[in-house]
C-alpha cells in the first residue's frame, strides 16, 4: 500500500468511485441561499481546528475553508486530486469502500435525504504540507441532490473535518481502518451496518436533526453561554421558535444517546461535540 504505484491506483479508483454522471433533468433539492447561509455559519468554526469543503460527483471541490490554516495547502489550487493524494493510503482504501456503499444507500428513493442532516463520521489521516500527518474526524453529509417521484441522486456532499491530533509523524498500523483481517476475512458488512443504522434512525421517530436544529446545536456547542434570547437574535427568530426547536433537540438527543435524563439542548450540544457530530 505504501509504494507510489499502489497509491496512484488507489487515487484513480477513488476518483472513479466519486465521479458519477449527473442527471440534469432532475430537480435540485436545496436552494443556493440556504447553502450560502450554511457556509457562512460554518466559517465561524474554523478557529476551532476545523476545515471543510464540498465535493461534487463531477469531481470538483468547492467552498474550501480552513484547509490552508490547518493543513498548509493553498486553497486556490486545492483540488480533488490533491485531496485524495494526501490521505494516508490505508484510510483511502477504507474511504473508497465507504463512498461506494454510501452512494448506493443515499441514491435509493426510499432513503430520505436531508440537507446536512445525516452524518457518517469516520477517522481519516491527512498529510500536512510540512510532511507530518494530521488525524481528523470526517463527517460526511448531503449538500445537494436531484430528484423526482421515482429517483434521487446525490450530486454534492459536505466534508467537515475536526482535528483530533495535529501532529503525527507516522500512523500506527493498529489504527488503520480495516474491513478485512490479515487473512482476507470480512470483519463486518459495512453496507449492512450503514443500512441498519439508517433504519434505526428512521424508526426512532426520525431523530436526524434538521438543519435549523443543527445550527442551534453548533452555536451552543462552541458558545455554551448563549441564552435562548441570544440564539433568537443570532438566527433572527422569535424566542418561542427557539424554545420549540430546543424541545425537539432534547427529544431527539434522548433517543440518539439513549439517555432520558437529558433535559437541555446545551447538554445535547456538548454530547454531539464530544462525538464529533457537529
Image (cartoon, grey):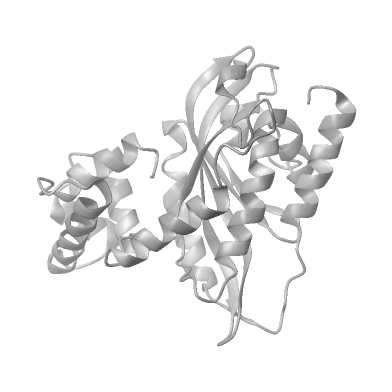
On the image, the x and y values in percent for residue 71 come to 62, 28
Please give left or right for residue 191 compared with residue 252 in the image.
right
Going 36% across and 66% down the picture, which residue do you hit?
A: 202
- Tell me if residue 117 can be seen: no
Please give left or right for residue 168 compared with residue 273 in the image.
right
Q: Residue furthest bottom?
A: 149
Vertical side of 225 occupied by 35: above or below: below
Q: Residue furthest top?
A: 169
On the image, the x and y values in percent for residue 164 come to 46, 26
Q: Quadrant of residue 118?
A: bottom left
Please give left or right for residue 269 compared with residue 159 in the image.
left
Going 54% across and 70% down the picture, which residue do you hit?
A: 32
Location of the N terminus (image quadrant):
top right
Q: Quadrant of residue 174?
A: top right
Vertical side of 94 occupied by 30: above or below: below
Image mark count: 0
On the image, the x and y values in percent for residue 261 come to 9, 45
Vertical side of 16 occupied by 186: above or below: above
Vertical side of 23 occupied by 203: above or below: above
Going 42% across and 54% down the picture, which residue do you hit?
A: 197
Going 33% across and 47% down the picture, which residue do you hit?
A: 218
- Tell me if residue 124 can be seen: yes
Location of the C terminus (image quadrant):
top left
On the image, the x and y values in percent for residue 6 come to 85, 31
190 or 161, nearer to the observer = 190
185 or 81, nearer to the observer = 185
Amino acid at each position: 500500500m505504501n509504494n507510489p504505484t499502489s497509491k496512484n491506483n488507489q487515487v484513480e479508483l477513488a476518483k472513479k468511485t466519486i465521479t458519477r454522471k449527473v442527471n440534469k433533468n432532475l430537480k435540485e433539492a436545496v436552494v443556493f441561499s440556504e447553502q450560502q447561509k450554511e457556509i457562512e455559519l460554518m466559517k465561524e468554526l474554523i478557529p476551532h481546528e476545523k476545515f471543510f469543503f464540498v465535493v461534487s460527483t463531477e469531481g470538483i471541490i468547492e467552498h474550501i475553508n480552513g484547509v490552508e490554516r490547518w493543513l498548509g495547502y493553498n486553497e486556490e489550487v486545492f483540488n480533488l486530486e490533491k485531496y485524495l493524494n494526501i490521505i494516508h493510503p490505508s484510510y483511502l482504501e477504507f474511504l473508497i469502500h465507504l463512498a461506494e456503499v454510501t452512494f448506493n444507500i443515499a441514491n435509493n428513493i426510499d432513503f430520505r435525504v436531508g440537507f446536512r442532516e445525516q452524518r457518517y463520521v469516520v477517522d481519516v489521516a491527512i498529510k500536512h504540507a510540512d510532511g507530518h500527518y494530521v488525524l481528523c474526524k470526517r463527517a460526511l453529509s448531503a449538500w445537494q441532490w436531484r430528484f423526482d417521484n421515482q429517483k434521487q441522486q446525490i450530486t454534492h456532499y459536505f466534508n467537515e473535518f475536526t482535528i483530533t491530533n495535529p501532529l503525527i509523524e507516522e500512523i500506527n498500523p493498529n489504527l488503520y481502518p480495516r474491513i478485512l483481517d490479515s487473512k482476507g476475512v470480512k470483519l463486518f458488512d459495512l453496507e449492512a451496518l450503514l443500512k441498519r443504522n439508517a433504519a434505526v434512525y428512521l424508526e426512532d421517530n426520525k431523530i436526524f436533526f434538521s438543519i435549523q436544529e443543527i445550527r442551534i446545536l453548533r452555536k451552543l456547542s462552541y458558545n455554551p453561554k448563549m441564552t435562548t434570547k441570544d440564539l433568537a437574535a443570532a438566527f433572527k427568530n422569535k424566542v418561542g421558535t427557539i424554545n420549540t426547536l430546543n424541545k425537539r433537540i432534547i427529544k431527539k438527543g434522548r433517543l440518539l444517546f439513549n439517555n432520558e435524563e437529558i433535559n437541555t439542548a446545551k447538554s445535547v450540544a456538548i454530547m454531539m461535540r464530544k462525538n464529533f457530530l457537529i
